[in-house]
Image (spheres, rainbow, N blue to C red):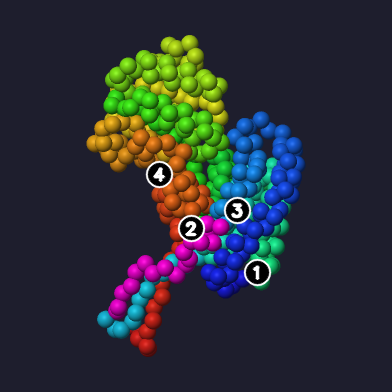
Amino acid sequence: MSLVLNISQRNSVLKKMATLIGQNSTAILEVNQKDLKNYSGGDRAMYDRLKVNQAKIDGMISSLEQLAQQEDPIGIERFRFNHDNGMQVFNKTAPFGTVLIIYESRPDVTVEAAGIAFKSGNKILLKGGKESLHSNLEIVKLWHQALLETGVTTDWVEYLNYNRTETQAFLERPTQNIDLIVPRGGEKLIDFVKTHATCPVIVSGRGNNFVYVHREADRALALDNIINGKTNKISACNAIDKVLIDKNLPNKEDFVRNLITSLKNYDVEILGDISLSKYEEVQPIRNKSVWHEEFLDYKIVIGETDNAIDAISKINEYSGGHSAAIITRNKKEAEVFMSSVDCAAVYHNASTRFTDGFQLGLGGELAISTDKLHQRGPIGLQHLVTNKWYIHGDGQIR
């Protein structure tokens, strides 16, 4: 385990894993049904993440195949310097070592996130939620088969079947070296990991994403953008929760009525500020704290704003720092908005649903970080590395 696997070995494991997922898809779907039947919670987003279907199986296979085709992220030269004394100095990318991924509900994380971390040369520790235990164990069994069939020890991928108390104890007093922790889940999970971890944590924070409909917006485009962002996948962290409509939008009344009708067609619960709660289908906001919430449900807040500056201020006050979009024909206004909003991803006339490693050209993602160190937004293969200095000499002393 001490030696980093070469790129050929890592790619062979990933390709073998893709083949095994395809060959064992029926078994994965069957054990996932067991997890779904055992799930007693009423959280629709959690259930949606827990469910594995053929589309998710295909996504797992595709992510592994794409990873196997990507360049090796290890050993890439970032800097070189020839010292006056003759030493040759290089800085190159290097693996973290051991990455612990703690996640809720999503069995596909056991494939896709683990695959990215493995391709980056890291040992993987997986701690999934109890609700997806059967699915996760079935997939980890395939990881071990893929490793063994390519001549690699199964130590590279390990599943931690711990309860909450055992997990807390492991975070506070790890029984093996951990270099990085990546929590994937809701705010409670992230806070739990941050509170108890004794090593660096990459925070994959809440969404609570905003769309601002500027006064020079294409109203049809804005409507499509909001409906897509809200209803395409409610369990996604890149879904829309808040809409700000410029009070000077031409034909604003018609736009708002069309928006309400379209949202109600999807049974979306609509909350509105004072200016918009006059509509029968819109419930008035009872507490300002709702502006901070990530819903992960068929629920949305719509509000009116005076101008772009007001919209930027509100987004920076309430959003999760994940994604925000402006809908406008005015490129200058869009540039001001995009440079001023403090989010990991900012959009002009496009859906926040694209904040995703695969969609943004990374070939998948380990997580979407709302921290600013060491990587912001989708964390892809090339971001899951640290660096290391290589100095070559011929006897130099200082």
Residue at the spot 66% in from the left edge and 30% down from the top edge: 42
Given the image, on which type of amino acid does mark 1 rest? Thr
Is label 1 in contact with label 3 (beta carbons under 8 Å)?
Answer: no
Q: Nearer the viewer, residue 91 or 21?
A: 21
Q: Is residue 131 above or below residue 86?
A: above
**Residue 119: image location, x then y, percent:** 54, 62
Alpha carbon of mark 3 to alpha carbon of mark 2: how far?
17 Å
Alpha carbon of mark 4 to alpha carbon of mark 1: how far?
38 Å
Given the image, on which type of amino acid does mark 4 rest? Ala
Q: Nearer the viewer, residue 182 or 18?
A: 18
Mark before the other along the chain sequence, 3 or 2: 3
Q: Which residue is mark 2?
A: 381
**Residue 357: image location, x then y, percent:** 47, 49
Mark before the other along the chain sequence, 4 or 1: 1
Relative placement, left or right, of 366 versus 343 is right
Whether residue 393 appears in magenta in the rendering, the answer is no
Q: Nearer the viewer, residue 71 or 376?
A: 71
> Outermost residue toward the left?
332
Q: Give the structural element (helix, strand or loop) at label 1.
A: loop
Q: Nearer the viewer, mark 3 or mark 2?
A: 3
Alpha carbon of mark 2 to alpha carbon of mark 1: how far?
22 Å
Other residues around mark 3 within 10 Å, as few (<14) / some (14–19) / many (≥20): many
Q: Is residue 91 above or below residue 313?
A: below
Is label 3 in contact with label 2 (beta carbons under 8 Å)?
Answer: no
Q: Which residue is mark 1?
A: 150
Alpha carbon of mark 4 to alpha carbon of mark 3: how far?
28 Å
State whether residue 182 appears in this view.
Answer: yes
Q: Which residue is mark 3?
A: 61
Q: Nearer the viewer, mark 1 or mark 3?
A: 3
Alpha carbon of mark 4 to alpha carbon of mark 2: how far?
18 Å
